[in-house]
Image (spheres, grey):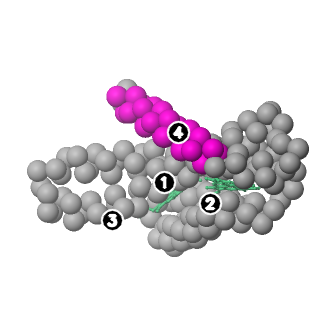
Amino acid sequence: MNYKVIFIGLLFVFALGFVSAGSHLVSADDDFDKKYEHHEGHDKDEKDYEDIGKTVGWGTAAAIGAAGLIFPIRRSTKFMVKNFPDRKKLFISLSKFFGKYHLFIGVIALGLSITHGVVMYLDKGELEGEGMIGLAAVILMAIAGIVGAVLFKNKKAKTLRTAHTGVIALAILIGLIHIFAS
Ligand code: HEM
Ligand code: HEM
């Protein structure tokens, strides 16, 4: 049990490191554009606020990716076990691991997306086009989360599973459009 907690902690640290490195690269370009857009320049604190918001945005994307791993893992386990029998133990434990922590990672993803949305909204002071698209993704994720909570109590309900997966797929698609539009 303990080594799993350590593993998930490490994953989180790696994701954060990756995310903050990425956000510095992205914000480096943005600084350049912003100086042209706002001649008076950005207040330093305000800039920090935006950077934090963007970093949390990338953290949201990483958490959604980690929660979504359950899908390819579940779908490929049979195939993998059949074609790589010597790796059977590994695939089964991966499947169990991501199954066990799915709900936890999913709730973190939802929490991060809301935090990111609130920080971005406070930074901009209004909900622009890309913010609206982000908001649509968060609303869909929250709906999928509620369906997921009911599914948790009744794992055999196929309709709930399909609904959870379908709504999440739509949220991911809209989330991607939001990232490309930002
Ligand atoms: C699933 C939900 C969401 C995800 C995965 C997400 C992800 C991201 C990411 C990764 C960025 C950074 C893009 C960059 O570095 O240029 C970003 C930017 C942004 N997001 Fe979100 N976001 C989500 C929801 C929201 C919500 C709900 C709002 C607003 C209420 C929002 C408002 C913004 C704004 C204003 C930007 C910055 C645009 C810019 O000036 O570059 N996002 N988002
Ligand atoms: C917000 C909180 C969330 C809750 C409460 C939740 C809950 C659940 C539950 C209880 C299951 C059934 C697991 C099992 O069979 O043992 C499930 C399955 C699933 N979830 Fe979530 N989930 C959440 C977020 C997410 C997110 C963010 C994603 C994708 C990025 C996601 C994608 C999936 C998929 C694809 C399945 C179906 C796996 C299969 O094919 O059986 N969920 N979820």
Between disc 2 and disc 1, whose residue precedes? 1
Circle 2 SS class: helix
Which label number is shown at residue 21?
A: 4
User: Whole-Å distance between the Cαs marked 2 and 3?
Assistant: 27 Å
Q: Quadrant of the N terminus?
A: top left
- As drawn, the label of residue 75 is 3
Distance from mark 2 CB to nearest ligand 1 atom below 8 Å: yes
Span shown in magenta: 3-28
Q: Secondary structure at mark 3?
A: helix
Q: Amino acid at mark 4?
A: Ala
Of pointers 2 and 3, the one earlier in the residue sequence: 3
Reading the chain from its start, which is encountered first: label 3 or label 4?
4
Amino acid type, label 1: Gly
Q: Is residue 10 above or below residue 65?
A: above
Work out whether residue 93 or residue 21 is closer to the camera in this orientation and state it: 21
User: In the drawing, does residue 20 fall left or right of residue 80?
Assistant: right
Crowding near pointer 3: few (<14 within 10 Å), some, many (20+)? few
Q: Earlier in the sequence, mark 1 or mark 4?
A: 4
Q: Is mark 3 within 8 Å of ligand 2?
A: yes
Q: Is mark 1 within 8 Å of ligand 2?
A: yes
The disc at residue 179 is 2
Q: From mark 2 to mark 1, how far is it between C-alphas?
A: 14 Å
* Residue wearing tag 1: 65
Instruction: Verify CB contact (< 8 Å) between mark 2 and mark 3.
Output: no
Q: Quadrant of residue 83?
A: bottom left
Q: x, y percentage for residue 18?
A: 48, 40
Q: Tell me residue 88's x, y (percent).
A: 18, 51
**Quadrant including the C terminus:** bottom right
Tell whether position 6 is magenta.
yes
Labels 2, 3: front one: 2
Callout 4: SS: helix
Residue depicted at 81% across the width and 38% down the height: 46
